[in-house]
Image: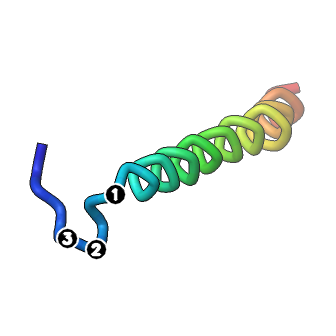
Amino acid sequence: MATLPEPFDHPAWLTGVGTAVAYGLILVVLFVALFVVPYLIFSLL
């Protein structure tokens, strides 16, 4: 694992970044499930 600069060395930074990344992934999955999949289904009919 790469060493981080001193101000970002605290575990709370890792927790915050992990939370933001997980939230972004959830938003992408929901967007695909709610908009892309129905669009593909209806465009194929």
Q: CA distance from mark 1 to mark 3?
A: 8 Å
Q: Is label 1 in a helix, a strand or a loop?
A: loop
Q: Nearer the viewer, residue 33 or 2?
A: 2
Left/right of residue 9 with respect to residue 38 in the rendered view? left
Residue under label 1: 10
* Amino acid on which disc 1 is placed: His
* Amino acid on which disc 3 is placed: Glu
In the picture, the quarter occupied by the N terminus is top left
Q: CA distance from mark 3 to mark 2?
A: 4 Å
Indicate which disc residue 6 carries. Answer: 3
Q: Is label 3 in a helix, a strand or a loop?
A: helix
Left/right of residue 18 with respect to residue 14 in the rendered view? right
Circle 2 Cα neighbour tier, 10 Å, few/some/many (<14 / 14–19 / ≥20) = few
Identify the image quadrant of residue 8: bottom left
Identify the image quadrant of residue 32: top right
Q: Nearer the viewer, residue 29 or 38?
A: 29
Indicate which disc residue 18 carries. Answer: none
What number of labels is visible?
Answer: 3
Q: How is the image coloured?
A: rainbow
Indicate the position of residue 18 as horizontal and vertical percent values.
48, 45
* Amino acid on which disc 2 is placed: Pro
Find the residue positioned furthest to the left: 2
Circle 1 Cα neighbour tier, 10 Å, few/some/many (<14 / 14–19 / ≥20) = few
Are the residues at dot 2 and dot 1 in contact (C-beta closer than 8 Å)? no
- Residue appearing at x 11%, y 56% in the figure: 3
- Residue appearing at x 56%, y 46% in the figure: 19
Left/right of residue 3 with respect to residue 23 in the rendered view? left
Residue under label 2: 7
Indicate the position of residue 34 as horizontal and vertical percent values.
85, 37
Q: Is label 2 in a helix, a strand or a loop?
A: helix
Are the residues at dot 3 and dot 2 in contact (C-beta closer than 8 Å)? yes
- Residue appearing at x 75%, y 40% in the figure: 36
